[in-house]
């Protein structure tokens, strides 16, 4: 199935990878979807989650229980957590191939300053760009991501006000159309999370901006890698 919405694509990719490694189809339970939502909300790149799932299933294949198929993504939770810890250590240590956090924050600052913003967006942009530059130093990942989340919410409110009710409603209709194929498959909390992320991305794209997120920046780097 072709993924029309990248936010839903994260969930679909986890589902398809798990099913392909498990060897036969498995209907996802509500706890399964909520677990993937937890990984997404924690900002874990897709490649990190898939690495953890692969590690868990590889270990199961060599265990005494290998004749029994893994029945839930919860079985993979510990290995995903371990993969996440390795990823965060690599970011903190600046390991080769890891994301350069200060450079990402400086890129965000330049983009915010050069974007063709409306009056409300332009009012918040200088302060945001200044703070992005001030934080462009080695810092704890969780602290930076939480701060970026708050700043993005402020920026999104300004952008939505500049766009006006009619254009925001058009964005929200487009989101609903893109997510319609998933409406009957996912719990309400998961769908609400995807809806909010898709709306944020589309509002920012209206002004040529990316998500203010270490997770999204890291995912872009991973996609562009040879």
Image: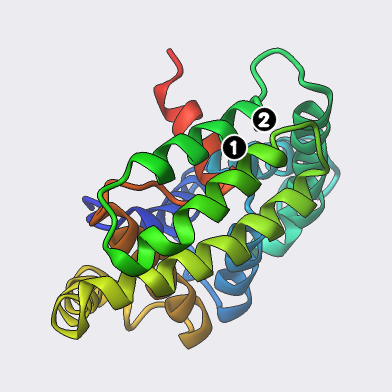
Q: In this view, does 105 lie above or below 160?
A: above
Percent x, y for residue 80?
73, 47
Say how many tags the image has: 2
In screen coordinates, is 26 left or right of 89?
left
Could you say which quadrant of the image residue 183 lies in?
Answer: bottom left
Label 2 crowd (10 A; few <14 / some 14-19 / many >=20): some
Q: Residue at x 26, y 62 (%)?
A: 118
In screen coordinates, is 174 left or right of 55?
left
> CB atoms at circles 1 and 2 under 8 Å apart?
yes
Q: Which of 175 and 214 is in front in this view?
A: 214
- Asked whether residue 22 appears in the rendered view, the answer is no
Location of mark 1 (residue): 105
Could you say which quadrant of the image residue 132 lies in?
Answer: top right
Q: In which quarter of the image is the C terminus?
A: top left
Percent x, y for residue 184?
33, 83
Label 1 crowd (10 A; few <14 / some 14-19 / many >=20): many
Residue 102 numbered mark, or none: 2
Percent x, y for residue 38?
65, 66
Residue 40 numbered mark, or none: none
Q: In this view, does 3 lie above or below 177?
A: above
Q: Which of 191 and 128 is in front in this view?
A: 128
Percent x, y for residue 107?
50, 32
In screen coordinates, is 214 left or right of 197?
right
- Report helix, strand or loop for mark 2: helix
């Amino acid at each position: 199935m072709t993924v029309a919405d990248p936010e839903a694509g994260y969930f679909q990719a986890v589902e398809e990878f798990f099913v392909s490694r498990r060897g036969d189809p498995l209907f996802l339970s509500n706890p399964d979807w909520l677990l993937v939502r937890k990984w997404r909300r924690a900002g874990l790149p897709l490649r990190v989650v898939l690495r953890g799932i692969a590690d868990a299933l590889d270990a199961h294949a060599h265990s005494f229980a290998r004749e029994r198929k893994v029945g839930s993504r919860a079985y993979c939770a510990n290995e995903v957590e371990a993969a996440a810890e390795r990823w965060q250590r690599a970011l903190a240590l600046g390991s080769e191939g890891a994301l350069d956090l200060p450079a990402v924050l400086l890129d965000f600052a330049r983009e915010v300053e050069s974007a063709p913003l409306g009056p409300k967006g332009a009012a918040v942009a200088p302060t945001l760009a200044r703070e992005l530059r001030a934080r462009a130093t080695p810092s704890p990942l969780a602290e930076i991501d939480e701060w970026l989340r708050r700043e993005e919410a402020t920026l999104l409110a300004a952008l939505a006000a500049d766009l006006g009710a009619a254009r925001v409603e058009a964005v929200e209709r487009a989101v609903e159309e893109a997510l319609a194929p998933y409406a009957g498959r996912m719990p309400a909390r998961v769908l609400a999370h995807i809806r909010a992320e898709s709306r944020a991305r589309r509002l920012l794209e209206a002004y040529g901006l990316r998500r203010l997120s270490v997770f999204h920046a890291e995912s872009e780097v991973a996609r562009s890698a040879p």
